[in-house]
Image: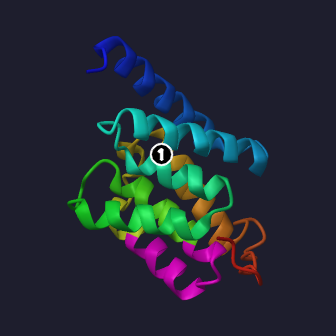
Amino acid sequence: MQSNEAFRTAQEADSEAWSQLVHGKESEIYYQRVLSEVIQRRTEYPAINDAKTLALAHYRAGQYKDSLDVVTESIKASVRGAYNVAHDLAISSMSAWRLNRPDEARATLAKLRDEVGDFAWEYGADAVTLIAEAEALIEGDMTTSQPSEPPTEVGG
């Protein structure tokens, strides 16, 4: 049996990873290392089962299908109004976009907006950050109204 202190340390490391992942300012190679660490913690401590961190780690590492698979399962298990659902839907819409599924990405973004309404801030600053990133990716910079083009190659 692992100590409570070791488990808390692993949880803190996962929280730190989440904070790094949300802001998305590092290289894909950096995020591949973060993903490896997130997966390792889940192997050592199965009780650390925060799907949003794993899904976002896959996304930042360029593993969009894996990201979408993880977050889809999380969404299925969520109830409307659950705290993580805003994060999950934002990650799902971005992953779908990167997989060249623009209709799915837009539909998920619409579902996200329906879920949070005008109250994104109630889901926390990280949710607001991810929602803004999803909107910019799928709909483009709001100052130019130009959406980004879906990728031509599918990341895995």
The spot of residue 85 in percent (x, y) is: 34, 57
Where is residue 21, by image quadrant?
top right
Residue 29 x, y percent position in the rendering:
77, 47
Closest to the observer: 61 or 23? 61
Locate the N terminus and report the quarter of the image it occupies: top left
101 within the magenta span:
yes
- Coordinates of residue 2 in the picture (x, y in percent): 31, 20
Category of crowding for the residue at label 1, using alpha-carbon neighbours closer than 10 angstroms: few (below 14), some (14–19), many (at least 20)? many
Q: Which residue is mark 1?
A: 53
Query: Which residue is at the far bottom?
Result: 103
Residue 134 among magenta residues? no
Is 109 placed above or below 124 here? below
The image shows a total of numbered marks equal to: 1
User: Is residue 10 toward the left or the right of residue 135 in the image?
Assistant: left
Give the residue at x 47% y 30%: 15
Q: Which residues are magenta?
A: 96-111
Callout 1, which amino acid? Thr
